Image (cartoon, coloured by chain):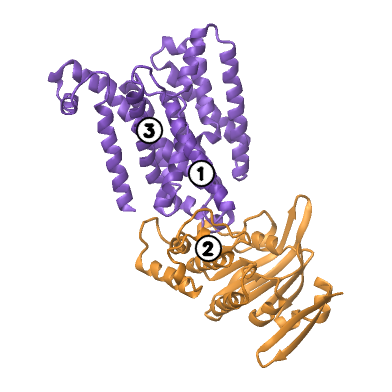
Amino acid sequence: MTRLMLTLTAAMLALFLISLTLGPADVGIGESLAALFDESYGPLTLVMREIRLPRALLAMIIGGGLGLAGAAMQGYLRNPLAEPGLIGVSSSAALGAVLAINTGLAASLTLGLPLAALAGALAGVFMVMALAGPQGGSLTLILAGIAISAMAAALTSLVLNLSPNPFAANEIVFWMMGSLADRSMLHVWLVLPFALAGAAILLTLARGLDALTLGEDAAQTMGMNLNRMRLLLVVGTASIVGGATAVAGAIGFIGLVVPHILRPLVGGQPSRLLWASALGGAIMLQLADIAVRIILPSRDLKLGVVTALVGAPLFLHLIYKTRKGLA
Amino acid sequence: MSVLSVRNLSVTLRNRPVLRDVSFEIRAGEFVGLLGPNGAGKSSLMRAALGLIPAAGSSSLAEMSAAERARAVSWMPQSREIAWPIPVERLVALGRLPHVPQGLRLPPGDQMLVDQSIERMGLDPFRQRAASRLSGGEQARALIARALAQDTPLLMADEPAAGLDPAHQISTMEVFANLAAEGRAALVSLHDLGLAARHCTRLILLTEGGILADGPPASVLTPALMARAFGISVWHEHTAHGPVFQPLEVL
């Protein structure tokens, strides 16, 4: 257990360093890392601090958040196919962002797009909670999430459909593919409080998630308050996913695949999976963000495309294993 | 000492009354078997007594806070859910959740309780095996061990013997009987009238949401009551091995 956590932490930090040394400016590893701390390097320091550092930090924060949220969501629903997007927050955040692009808010205000996405996420959470009601189990939550996701997706399509010119439509489509390119420290400071608050909330669920392994009745008689857990799950997940979508666009599959890969390594226990998945998510998103820069550096390959390309086959593997288990 | 006091408990599910004015008390030292045909309200009675479903009337457990209740009763629902492939040892250790703050390692006293519970249910060979991949009967025993580790004055179980082989049915009933003899109490729903006759100290017979009979096994398992509750004829005899009880045919 501790060895796994140490390995994951080491891998995450190593990838963070690799990510820092990658970019179109062809500079050696030692030199670029030195430039991060030493201002005498001039433009290189600027490149490191304003371009590469935010990118690497965002990959770590967002990937970690998505991995953690996925582990919490799967633990609460007791379903390995659950993922953070299930409660409709990523779709409603995307709708907010798309509206910002379409109305020109994104172009006229520095943080117009992420702030509009956060507003969309917030509206989505309120609607999901209102639909799901204060009581009621996981089924109403899933149904409410599906309803909000479908509604937000429909409205996003409508905005695309009515977009004033092909350039706006193009921008929307590319934004929705998710990316960490050209983000600044401003984006880091924007997402960080949401990610930290969300993570703090989700980590309080650890005991409850363990108890839920035995079902809702058993968890309740072990002293867990399921209504409170559900509220915390939704608020924590929304905070992470809303913040992540606001600065990076839609990045799928991390919250689904990472907990699934790591579950056998932590002995299945949901509380142990939370931290491991946070580290695993940070690793996977770092890897994906390194891949988009190495594979096709000139074509601006989108991050969400890569996570989906990697995630989908892993998902197929999951189906295959489930089928083998049933046979 | 009373471990559960239920007064005039009534439950209505989807406008259908499933439990009507049920009152009883369970004291330390009792092993109470809850009998009754399918749909008589056994599960609803237990869940209402625990405060898991809304009910009219009162139950001492339902009035407790969730944290208090977790130290007063452990509950084994009929659906034996084990969502994740978690090792038996850690599954059983979940029973200590209401007692210890979260930590990767249990305090020695708590670990001892976990070990005792594992041993009691004969699960030593399975300690490191993933609980969700054990056979149905082994899973049932792991879940009972989990409840034992919760270390409460009262244990409640919905059909804990269902799906077990004869040897494990008997040993499971003996575990409950021993707990009662040690000064705890158990309330267990059952369909096996023979097991109920041999192991329980008291039986509550439930039909159509009401208590038809409540007392020592010999006073409840009478031909007349069995005919009324289940519509069956029965044969029973007191032997050197204790009471033997056998349903014969549908009347």
Mark 1 lies on residue: A318
Is residue B240 shown above or below B228? below
Q: Amino acid at mark 2?
A: Leu
Quarter of the image where one finds residue B196: bottom right
Mark 2 lies on residue: B134
Percent from the top left, x then y, of residue A269?
Answer: 44, 53
Q: Which chain is purple?
A: A
Quarter of the image where one finds residue B156: bottom right
Query: What chain is tagged by disc 2?
Result: B
Classify 10 Å Cα crowding around label 1: few (below 14), some (14-19), many (20 and above): some
Q: Are marks 2 and 1 in contact (CB under 8 Å)?
A: no
State the separation of the CA atoms marked 2 and 1.
21 Å
Query: What chain is tagged by disc 1?
Result: A
Q: Are marks 3 and 2 in contact (CB under 8 Å)?
A: no
Percent from the top left, x then y, of residue A49?
Answer: 24, 22
Mark 3 lies on residue: A285
Percent from the top left, x then y, of residue A10?
Answer: 27, 42
Q: Residue furthest left?
A: A40
Mark found first going from the N terminus, 3 or 1: 3
Q: Which chain is orange?
A: B
Is residue A244 shown above or below A78? above
